[in-house]
Image (cartoon, rainbow, N blue to C red):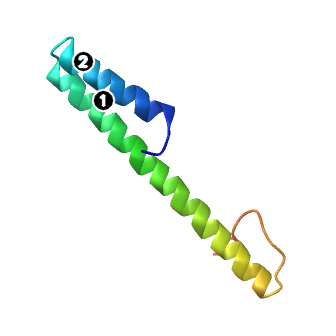
Amino acid sequence: MGGDRGQVLAAIAALIALLVFHRYLTAVLFAFIYLAGEAEYRAVKRRELEDAQWREMALRFHLPPRDEPPVLAP
């Protein structure tokens, strides 16, 4: 688990919906929220890793680092 509070809350809510209220569809909804949170966490981590790799490459070629990638002109 990525350590995200939203994922923890979704897991707890799914268990409560399933075990206390016997609402299976609600539990499935919270499970989906949990999985979507995990996918979002992985996407953000991958983007941070890619940004770090591009910055390292720019420094290797003595290019000034940029906050955003260049925009191609039409």
Q: Report if the CB atoms under discs 1 and 2 are less than 8 Å apart.
A: yes
What percent of the width, then of the height, locates residue 38? 40, 46
Does label 1 or label 2 sit earlier along the sequence? 2
Residue at (28, 34) in percent of width and height: 31
Residue at (42, 35) in percent of width and height: 7
Residue at (19, 17) in percent of width and height: 19
The residue pinned by badge 2 equals 17
Residue at (78, 68) in percent of width and height: 66
Q: Nearer the viewer, residue 70 or 40?
A: 40
What percent of the width, then of the height, locates residue 54? 66, 75
Res. 73 visible in picture: no
Q: Residues within 10 Å of mark 1 (few under 14, many from 20)?
A: many
The N terminus: image quadrant: top left
Res. 55 visible in picture: yes
Q: Secondary structure at mark 1?
A: helix
The residue pinned by badge 1 equals 30
Question: Residue 21 occupies which quadrant of the picture?
Answer: top left
- Residue type, numbered disc 1: Phe
Q: Secondary structure at mark 2?
A: helix
Q: Nearer the viewer, residue 62 or 4?
A: 4
What percent of the width, then of the height, locates residue 25? 17, 25
